[in-house]
Image: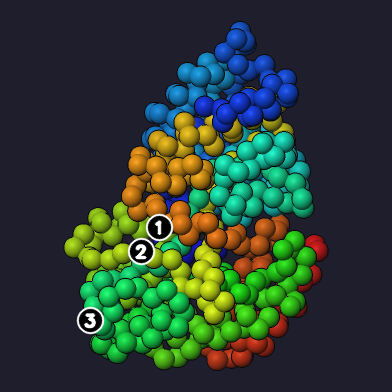
């Protein structure tokens, strides 16, 4: 996945249960589901996932979630199989031809359109029609491909602004910045405090890192149906966002590590009190508590751009039934269960952020989830297209050209648009 290392660590650590309401039950009945407790036949389904086997999410899945499911549906046996993240997608693609894959898969959200395009996933339009209002819109959008839904959102995350209270106090600020103008001014003041201090530090120049700024400035990568990049990624708003970030970098308000070739860690420097702002996800508070327990910090929304919008990026995983499954009814029952409160709550309690809006202010969830839940109201997915990884590379290269002064922001994004356009029709 083309995202920062902290996101990769979180992704590999991640985890996730009552059939969701009478509408979901009606859907399964309409499908002719026979794998309920009244059946005398045992059905075994295999669940492929990339949970880290030593982390609490996986232990919760095995010791609480799956047992709860099997208590409700005693004639469906679920076998969880951990597959390393770096090989999971290729294994899934290989099973399409070989037919020896899982019944259910926990997929990175950026893989969903690629799997849907090759016919690997069972459509879920009927389920989404009944349950659409239950999910945050950004995570749900990652399951859509060419007007149809495939799978359901399983777990989610987004990035918010973390700020160090001590550094803000030292530059005379009592509140975090709410606009990009305020963010720029405070970042410059913090960087001026010490030659080793920076107002803002970022993990890299991937789309994951830069798109919150482009979106908040009113820009975009493509149009809404992912058919054109020209006029969107190189629009005045997108260009202004990139120029804004390049200016932060040139004026030392933004740490230079994002160009690579450095062991500089934004998370650690923030923890040491050397950086005023970082954008990070819900994996960050537990890490800071463990490593920098004395740090005084808080979280706020991504600073709003000139148009007043604060928009961040959606991360996470989806759950889908494989079209090659010989147990589609049972697999669908499990998929529904994993996206109900019965599964979302225990996995949320150990750090896996739920996709259900009903759990936004639930007292059983970690308190720090609230900031991310607020940001998720407007957060967007990266382009939901089978060629996303290629698009991410093109964007990263364009951002690098602008930051290194090898092209203007406009020229770099013009070139990116020309390269992305044909990928959207491929």
Mark 1 and mark 3: span between their CA atoms?
24 Å
Categorize mark 3 by other alpha carbons within 10 Å: few (<14), some (14-19), many (20+).
Answer: few
State which quarter of the image contains the N terminus: bottom right
Marks 3 and 2 close (CB-CB < 8 Å): no
The residue pinned by badge 2 equals 299
User: Residue 144: horizontal and vertical position, in percent?
Assistant: 69, 50
User: Residue 253: horizontal and vertical position, in percent?
Assistant: 39, 85
The residue pinned by badge 1 equals 371
Q: Is residue 265 visible?
A: no
The residue pinned by badge 3 equals 170
Mark 2 and mark 1: span between their CA atoms?
7 Å
User: Residue 76: horizontal and vertical position, in percent?
Assistant: 57, 20
Categorize mark 1 by other alpha carbons within 10 Å: few (<14), some (14-19), many (20+).
Answer: many
Marks 2 and 1, the one that precedes in the sequence: 2
Q: How many marks?
A: 3
Categorize mark 2 by other alpha carbons within 10 Å: few (<14), some (14-19), many (20+).
Answer: many
Image position of 36 (left or right of 121): left
User: Residue 234: horizontal and vertical position, in percent?
Assistant: 68, 80
SS at circle 2 = strand
Q: Please name the residue shown 67% across and 66% down the image.
A: 390
Q: Is residue 33 visible?
A: yes
């Amino acid at each position: 996945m083309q995202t920062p290392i902290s996101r990769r660590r979180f992704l590999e650590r991640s985890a996730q249960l009552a059939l969701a309401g009478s509408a979901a039950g009606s859907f399964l009945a309409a499908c002719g589901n026979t794998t309920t407790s009244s059946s005398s036949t045992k059905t075994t389904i295999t669940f492929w996932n990339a949970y880290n086997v030593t982390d609490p999410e996986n232990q919760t899945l095995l010791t609480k979630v799956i047992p709860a499911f099997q208590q409700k549906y005693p004639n469906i046996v679920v076998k969880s199989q951990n597959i390393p993240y770096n090989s999971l997608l290729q294994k899934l693609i290989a099973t399409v031809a070989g037919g020896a894959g899982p019944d259910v898969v926990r997929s990175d959200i950026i893989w969903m359109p690629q799997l849907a395009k090759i016919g690997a996933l069972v459509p879920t339009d009927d389920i989404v029609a009944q349950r659409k209002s239950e999910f945050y819109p950004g995570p749900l959008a990652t399951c859509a491909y060419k007007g149809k839904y495939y799978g359901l959102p399983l777990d989610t995350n987004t990035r918010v602004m973390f700020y160090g209270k001590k550094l803000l106090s030292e530059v005379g600020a009592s509140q975090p910045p709410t606009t990009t103008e305020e963010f720029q001014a405070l970042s410059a003041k913090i960087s001026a405090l010490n030659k080793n201090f920076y107002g803002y530090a970022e993990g890299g120049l991937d789309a994951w890192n830069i798109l919150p700024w482009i979106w908040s400035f009113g820009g975009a990568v493509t149009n809404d149906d992912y058919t054109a990049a020209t006029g969107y990624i190189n629009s005045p708003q997108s260009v202004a966002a990139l120029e804004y970030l390049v200016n932060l970098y040139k004026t030392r308000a933004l740490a230079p590590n994002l160009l690579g070739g450095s062991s500089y860690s934004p998370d650690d420097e923030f923890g040491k009190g050397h950086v005023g702002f970082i954008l990070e996800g819900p994996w960050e508070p537990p890490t800071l508590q463990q490593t920098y327990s004395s740090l005084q910090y808080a979280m706020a929304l991504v600073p709003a751009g000139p148009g007043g919008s604060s928009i961040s990026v959606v991360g996470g995983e989806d759950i889908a039934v494989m079209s090659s499954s010989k147990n589609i009814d049972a697999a669908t029952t499990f998929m529904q269960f994993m996206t109900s409160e019965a599964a979302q709550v225990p996995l949320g309690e150990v750090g896996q952020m739920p996709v259900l809006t009903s759990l936004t202010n639930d007292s059983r969830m970690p308190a720090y989830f609230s900031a991310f839940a607020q940001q998720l109201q407007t957060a967007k997915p990266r382009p939901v297209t089978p060629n996303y990884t290629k698009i991410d590379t093109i964007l990263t290269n364009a951002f690098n050209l602008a930051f290194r002064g090898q092209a203007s922001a406009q020229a770099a994004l013009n070139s990116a648009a020309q390269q992305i356009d044909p990928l959207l029709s491929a």
